[in-house]
Image: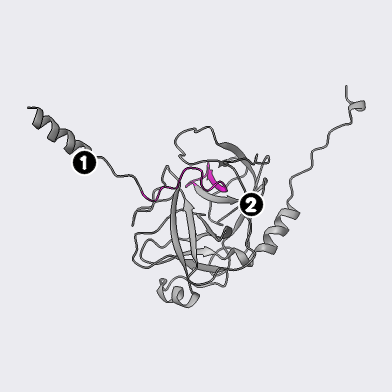
Amino acid sequence: MNFLLLVVALGLAGASPLPDSKVCQPHSKPWQVYIHGGHPSCSGALINKWWIVTSFNCPTIPYSSLASLGEHDVTVEEGTEQHIQVAEVIRHSPYRSPAHSLAMVRLAEPARLNHNVKTIPLPTRCTQPGETCYVSGWGSTVPNQYEPDQHLKCITVPVVDDQTCMNTLPEYIYWSHGMVCAGQNNSDNCLNDDGSVMVCDGQLQGVQWMGLGCSNPSVYTKLCLYNNWIREVMDNYAPPLTTQMPPSMTT
């Protein structure tokens, strides 16, 4: 009887799900932002205490969407989160293929930078083919499944040269100079999340433009070409200054 119980126990232990190797080390991407309140949820990257960079098609609505910083497991409160309303969304025009896919999101109040909430630098150079980059987001890493995941996922991808990417993409995808491709053909190393963040050599180099499953590399906005636009948006849409009366004039 004891032997049978041992066999059953071992069988149950063997049936336990294995840890997901693509789940990020918690809070290892402190610039990652979970944007929700629209449908579906999406990702972005914090570039200063007021501003987030994300994809054009991240469904963000001022004063309806929330930006959650310091997140890992979006189904529980871990004590590290800051939930801040979105105050403004500025989308690059014209939209998407064959032009651009980029949006800036301003927070209603500044993020409090700490160990779990940090900014990521804008690129000082463009990526090179063969360079290794890191992509993170709350999307599915399972082929042909697109439901969001509760844990932040991380994958490692190589940058693909433009010509190779153009040759492997479906015919309906019009290539733009504002795109950069990363990933491998027919691989299980994929991540489907609108606005998932691509970081190369410690710099923000892309947000997902479109994911094409695991059969092709994913397409990201080539952020090294948009530094001037990003800075112009931050200057032109700066948060309103709050003024405080001198102590002698208060009642």
Q: Which residue is depicted at the point 63% across and 59% down?
A: 122
Q: Is residue 8 above or below residue 89?
A: above
**Residue 169 placed where, x, y %?**
42, 71
Q: Nearer the viewer, residue 50 or 115?
A: 115
Give the main secondary structure, helix, strand or loop, of the magenta stretch: loop
**Residue 121 placed where, x, y %?**
63, 56
Q: Which mark is residue 14?
A: 1
Q: Nearer the viewer, residue 73 or 55?
A: 73
Q: Which residue is depicted at the point 55% across and 35% down?
A: 80
Residue 215 in magenta?
no
Q: Is residue 74 above or below residue 91?
A: above
Q: Which residue is depicted at the point 44% across and 36% down?
A: 75
Amino acid type, mark 1: Gly
- Horizontal side, residue 171 vs residue 178: left or right: left
Dot 2: what SS?
Answer: loop
The residue sitting at the front extreme is 3
The residue range painted magenta reads: 21-41
Q: Which residue is depicted at the point 40% across and 73% down?
A: 168
